[in-house]
């Protein structure tokens, strides 16, 4: 199925009557949608909300004018593909596919250092976050896409090295990619909870003030037709600026 087979209004990335703050719609039909979540916006209310009142789920209910069911979550600081359903049956079917690991999620991430291997897997159990101390299996596959060395001192060296990674989580634990990169000492840039403050400051000096994790691609079977959908969210804004920096060095194109 072509991504252009969705409702006509989804082609423009906006719904009828939506204002300039509308969340971009990447794909939509009568059962489900994939939207491009902005960085810095919480998906829904939770204990981590800290008194906030603006949530993606509320915006989407108003934008679509109907109930919505978030099939999975993205951290507040993460941008990109987010899957939702418009009815309980579709949400249940997609949730089961997610639990069965039949939903492929690809992320772009920028980390400190250059991983030694072009592709590697981190298999490291993680707890479920605050109030959930039980550790469960957690597996993330990584591919090194490009590297860059910047003329910025760090830890006694005259330069700093960074890598652009593709991350594919096999499981879905709390902040899994961020915590796995910390476990490997390749901290995610812009991550104020699990990252490295020295390198975060380097990127702020370059005008990059966001966490560099972007849900670039979702692939899943439509719960009713069975057709495999592949939906992508091109990086924008500050993340696109960082990709330009890597492209200038490697000559590769990303996104």
Image (tube, helix red, strand yellow):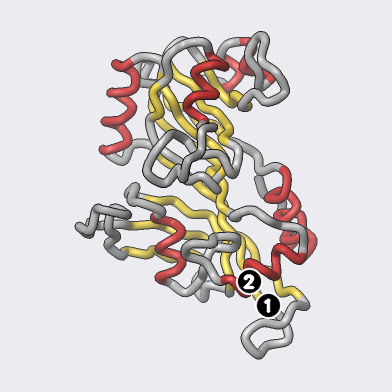
Residue 17 on image: x %, y %: 67, 9
Q: Residue at x 36, y 51 (%)?
A: 174
Q: Which mark is residue 160?
A: 1
> Local crowd at mark 1 within 10 Å, few (<14), some, or many (≥20)?
some
**Element under disc 2:** helix
For residue 186, above or below residue 139: below
Residue 135 on image: x %, y %: 22, 59
* First along the sequence among labels 2 and 1: 1
- Residue extending farthest front: 51
- Residue extending farthest left: 134
Q: Residue at x 56, y 14 (%)?
A: 5
Side of 144 where 9 appears, left or right: right
Q: Residue at x 58, y 33 (%)?
A: 36
Quadrant showing the C terminus: top right
Side of 70 where 12 appears, left or right: right
Can you identify the residue that label 2 sits on? 199
């Amino acid at each position: 199925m072509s991504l252009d087979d969705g409702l006509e209004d989804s082609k423009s990335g906006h719904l009828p009557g939506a204002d300039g703050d509308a969340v971009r719609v990447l794909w939509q039909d009568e059962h489900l949608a994939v939207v491009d979540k902005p960085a810095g916006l919480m998906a829904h209310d939770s204990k981590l909300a800290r008194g906030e009142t603006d949530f993606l789920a509320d915006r989407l209910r108003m934008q679509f004018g109907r109930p919505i069911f978030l099939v999975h979550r993205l951290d507040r600081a993460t941008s990109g593909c987010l899957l939702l359903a418009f009815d309980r049956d579709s949400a249940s079917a997609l949730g089961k596919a997610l639990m069965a690991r039949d939903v492929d999620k690809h992320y772009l991430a920028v980390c400190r250092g250059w991983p030694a291997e072009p592709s590697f897997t981190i298999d490291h159990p993680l707890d479920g976050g605050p109030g959930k101390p039980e550790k469960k299996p957690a597996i993330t596959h990584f591919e090194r896409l490009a590297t860059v060395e910047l003329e910025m001192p760090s830890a006694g060296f005259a330069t700093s090295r960074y890598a652009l990674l593709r991350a594919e989580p096999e499981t879905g634990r709390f902040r899994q990619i961020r915590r796995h990169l910390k476990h490997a000492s390749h901290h995610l840039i812009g991550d104020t909870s699990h990252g490295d403050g020295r390198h975060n400051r380097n990127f702020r000096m370059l005008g990059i003030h966001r966490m560099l994790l972007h849900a670039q691609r979702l692939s899943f079977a439509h719960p009713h037709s069975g057709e495999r959908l592949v939906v992508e969210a091109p990086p924008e804004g500050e993340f696109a600026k960082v990709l330009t920096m890597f492209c200038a060095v490697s000559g590769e194109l990303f996104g």
